[in-house]
Amino acid sequence: MSKLTTQRIEQWRNDLAKQSARTRSETAHRKLDDDRPRRVTANRYLTQLRAALNRAWRYGKIASREQWQRVEPFKGVSAARERCLTVAEANRLLNGCNSDFRLLCRAALETGARYGELTRLRVSDFNPDIGMVLIRTSKAGKPRDVVLSEQGVGFFKQVCAGRSGDEIMLRRADGAAWGNSHQQRQMRSACARAKVIPAVGFHQLRHTWASLAIMNGTPLFVVAKNLGHRDAKMVGMGGCWWHHQAAVVTQPPPPLK
């Protein structure tokens, strides 16, 4: 670590920005011509490297941190902000869904949970007495409780009424469980019928929930907890709520129907 110079770190950062960036598509990977995503990635790795080196310096493993403190991230780049639906768009999307998929999308808009988290829910994971849904296995591998709004509690009561606790909560019309990537075609069809342009993926429902929750006055730490983030700083990473944080919201948005 003592051999790391400002020049070597800058060269490493620049080399990262020159690597071919790729993005997922349904059938294959394709290269991106825009170099902004590559610079965003390089900045993120630079931040992680500096954090590790700073930790080593604090514990006396490195005599000086002068070299890496001189290295600046790329300017004028930032992560893309995720598209969020308006309340009107969300309602149109729900109306454009098939009946079984509508329940799944409504659950996402009431919880901010991911597709995989929702498809693994059991009826017993909803607790109407405390108004929470238990996510047993999250992306981070840790369970978490999602606090529901009043309308969210009402929705899950309807979904779970009279059912056995060990049943899959959100199922397809034929009674089978939703599988990997089953949501993709359903979302495209629903967006087309609802005239949601540009179309969104299922993950944008998670960002939409966060954005609308904050507009409705939900504290950031509650939003972060529901999303499974370690702290409120992570809430802004998706970018949605930045569109609303500067606005003075005098009335909450109308409920989703």
Image (cartoon, grey):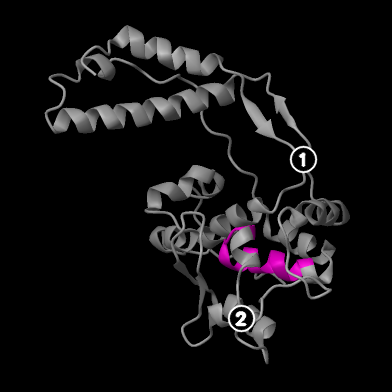
Q: Marks 2 and 1: in contact by CB < 8 Å? A: no
- Left or right of residue 123: residue 214: left
Residue that badge 1 annotates: 26
- Which quadrant holds the N terminus? top left
In this picture, is 249 found above or below 100?
A: above
Counting from the top left corner in percent of width and height, residue 32 is at: 68, 23
Please name the residue that numbered disc 2 is placed on.
123
Question: Is 97 situated left or right of 210 in this image?
Answer: right
Dominant secondary-structure state across the stretch colored magenta: helix
Q: Which of the 4 image quadrants contains residue 211?
A: bottom right
Q: Residue at x 45, y 19 (%)?
A: 74
Q: Is residue 88 magenta?
A: no
Residue 62 position in % (x across, y down): 16, 22
**Tag 1: residue type?**
Glu
Decide which of 104, 182 is in the foreground and name it.
182
Q: Tag 2, which secondary structure?
A: helix
Q: Earlier in the sequence, mark 1 or mark 2?
A: 1
As displayed, is residue 31 above or below residue 142? above
Q: Position of residue 230 (x, y in %)?
A: 38, 54
SS of the residue at dot 1? loop
- Residue 189's disc is none
